[in-house]
Image (tube, rainbow, N blue to C red):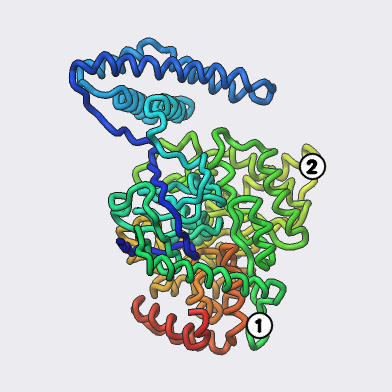
């Protein structure tokens, strides 16, 4: 038995055999061969090309509808690569000159070509890199055959163990079989952690070296409450955890029963609890958990799972589906927050050196106006179906906000010309998630209807700590005095300007921070759906007077450690059963 400690990011307990997956999808098990083996490797590479090409021809034949033309085009490009003699010759030469395996030669050659493509400034050419990686995977699938482990075709329950996972990979997991997630890398507010929480899959991250310790098929316990992973537990530990797991399920069941109760403090102050979602399907879960609407719809996930860019109709259907669940209640649609750790399939390999400070979010939209306008067009069309609001992420200054609003007005004019109905008075908000936005909140407030504080990014940019980097996860804290001063300022500026304010970062789903937030004047929060009942229970157990005392004391403190330990004690005193 071995116990590893990491960071708990999604609550619950999972016990199942491990499935180890590689973030590259494929591992090359062996690089070199003895010289006499070279001809065999050349033949293996040739066969792989042939089988892959036959497979593509077969697949292409299966796509008969006209709307599949785009897919046919992609297949045609892939086929032309597979039939390219000079490419095959490069691979054969490499096998002969370096005495390497067919899989190594295929991978090295194709990755070399892809990296040249990504450096070319022309978007069309740089995006072809994604095709090359696709071809590489197809060939490796032939060469490695059954030696690789596959998460797409599961038939039994597993715990997924990986060095790192992308938000897209995590979002594609089948909840029926993937019972828990454990990774070497990551942090509490990385998007992968957020997705695991939304899916309700227990997860622990920042378990340095876990993948070196574990073998596929080992029994693994993932304790997403305490941040612990136990490999090959002994009989006693296993029984103890089976009992914990039952207790946890019973607690969740009890909390679900307060679904219909209002989120009101003991002294009668009402708090609005909204849900954060990544996919339209989750709107139902927010409703089931007792949420009063959607406070953050992370629309960029529309781009992450698909090989092609979503059309305006794809956008519209996703928004319409969500709005229909919350017909007369707010649905805040955040425009795409691509970049940083969330890339479209085509941009997957064109990484920036410092992506969180790079072409991310609204900056990306302002440089890709066609894409942005398509999304705005769809949001405005959906605005007549319910109480849709629109929210712009990562606004860092007034000029950016003005430019964004101008584009929105352009799209409104286009709709007018096309005689398409939309809500002219749609509420417009911004996320306050950079120190510069927080420091200029009073001027931004004059031009918007609401603010939503994005603490996940606000913390990383204020403290200069990458939210997804396990090496600095101990420095990442939402209750650092610097962060709290900024939050207080944002709340005060929103109140002064009489605009609505909510907080939608992961801080809102931390039971220990709720009293502090209420004491600082926050009355609306948006959080991961599974946590809504627990947070509601806490709100119903406190008075605003207690919360004001907590906030006063905390804002007088200068050390993060002191604040954290004070908040833990305060929460335990007021609500011993929850902690
Ligand atoms: C945030 O930054 O707090 C936020 C809610 O947005 P995201 O986590 O999607 O960056
Ligand atoms: Mg953010």
Question: Does residue 316 appear left or right of residue 87 in this picture?
Answer: right
What residue is rendered at 47% in x and 84% in y?
572
* Sequence order check, earlier mark of 1 and 2: 1
> Which quarter of the rendered picture does the N terminus lie within?
bottom left
How far across and down, in percent of the image, does residue 29 sit? 29, 34
Find the distance from the CA under tag 1 to the CA under tag 2. Answer: 41 Å
- Residue beneath label 2, please? 420
Q: Are marks 1 and 2 in contact (CB under 8 Å)?
A: no
What residue is rendered at 62% in x and 73% in y?
255
Element on which disc 1 rests: loop
Q: Quadrant location of residue 41?
A: top left
Query: In this rendering, which labeled residue sits more in front, label 1 or label 2?
Result: 1
Q: Nearer the viewer, residue 88 or 317?
A: 88
* Residue at the outermost top position: 85
Q: Quadrant location of residue 263?
A: bottom right
Q: Nearer the viewer, residue 571 or 258?
A: 258
Against 124, residue 491 (above or below) is below
- Residue beneath label 1, please? 269
């Amino acid at each position: 038995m071995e116990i590893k400690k990491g960071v708990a990011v999604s609550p619950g307990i999972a016990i199942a055999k491990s499935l180890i997956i590689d973030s590259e999808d494929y591992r090359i098990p062996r690089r070199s061969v003895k010289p006499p083996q070279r001809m065999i490797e050349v033949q293996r590479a040739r066969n792989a090309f042939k089988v892959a090409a036959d497979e593509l021809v077969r697949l292409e034949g299966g796509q008969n509808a006209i709307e599949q033309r785009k897919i046919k085009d992609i297949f045609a490009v892939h086929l032309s690569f597979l039939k390219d003699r000079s490419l095959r010759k490069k691979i054969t030469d490499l096998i002969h000159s370096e005495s390497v395996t067919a899989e190594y030669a295929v991978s090295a050659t194709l990755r070399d070509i892809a990296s040249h493509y990504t450096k070319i400034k022309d978007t069309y050419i740089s995006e072809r890199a994604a095709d090359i990686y696709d071809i590489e995977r197809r060939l490796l699938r032939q060469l490695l055959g059954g030696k690789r482990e596959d998460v797409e075709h599961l038939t039994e329950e597993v715990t997924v163990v990986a060095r790192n996972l992308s938000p897209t990979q995590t979002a594609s997991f089948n909840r029926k079989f993937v019972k828990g997630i454990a990774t070497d890398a990551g942090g509490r507010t990385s998007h992968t952690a957020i997705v695991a929480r939304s899916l309700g899959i227990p997860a622990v991250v920042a378990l340095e070296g876990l993948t070196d310790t574990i073998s596929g098929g080992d029994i693994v316990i993932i304790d997403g409450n305490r941040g612990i992973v136990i490999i090959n537990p002994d009989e006693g530990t296993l029984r103890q955890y089976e009992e914990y797991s039952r207790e946890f399920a019973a607690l969740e069941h009890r909390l679900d029963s307060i679904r219909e109760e209002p989120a009101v403090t003991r002294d009668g102050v009402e708090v609005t609890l909204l849900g954060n979602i990544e996919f339209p399907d989750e709107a139902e879960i927010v409703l089931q958990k007792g949420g009063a609407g959607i406070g953050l719809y992370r629309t960029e996930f529309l781009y992450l799972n698909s090989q092609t860019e979503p059309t305006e109709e794809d956008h519209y259907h996703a928004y319409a589906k969500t709005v229909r669940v919350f017909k007369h209640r707010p649905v805040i649609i955040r425009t795409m927050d691509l970049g940083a750790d969330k890339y479209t399939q085509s941009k997957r390999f064109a990484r920036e050196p410092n992506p969180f400070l790079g072409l991310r979010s609204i900056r990306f939209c302002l440089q890709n106006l066609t894409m942005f306008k398509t999304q705005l067009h769809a949001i405005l069309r959906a605005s007549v179906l319910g109480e849709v609001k629109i929210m712009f992420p990562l606004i860092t200054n007034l000029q950016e906000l003005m430019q964004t609003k101008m584009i929105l007005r352009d799209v409104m004019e286009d709709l007018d010309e096309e005689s398409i109905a939309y809500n002219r008075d749609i509420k417009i908000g911004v996320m306050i998630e950079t120190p510069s936005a927080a420091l200029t909140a009073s001027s931004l407030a004059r031009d918007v209807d609401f603010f939503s504080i994005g603490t996940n990014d606000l913390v990383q940019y204020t403290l200069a700590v990458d939210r997804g980097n396990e090496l600095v996860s101990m420095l990442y804290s939402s209750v650092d005095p610097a962060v709290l001063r900024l939050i207080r300022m944002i709340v005060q500026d929103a109140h002064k300007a009489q605009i609505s304010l909510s907080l939608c970062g992961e801080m809102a789903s931390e039971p220990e921070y709720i009293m502090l937030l209420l004491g600082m004047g926050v009355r609306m929060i948006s959080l991961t759906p599974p946590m809504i009942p627990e947070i509601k229970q806490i709100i119903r157990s406190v008075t605003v007077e207690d919360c004001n005392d907590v906030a006063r004391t905390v804002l007088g403190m200068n050390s993060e450690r002191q604040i954290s330990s004070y908040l833990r004690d305060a929460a335990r005193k007021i609500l011993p059963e929850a902690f």
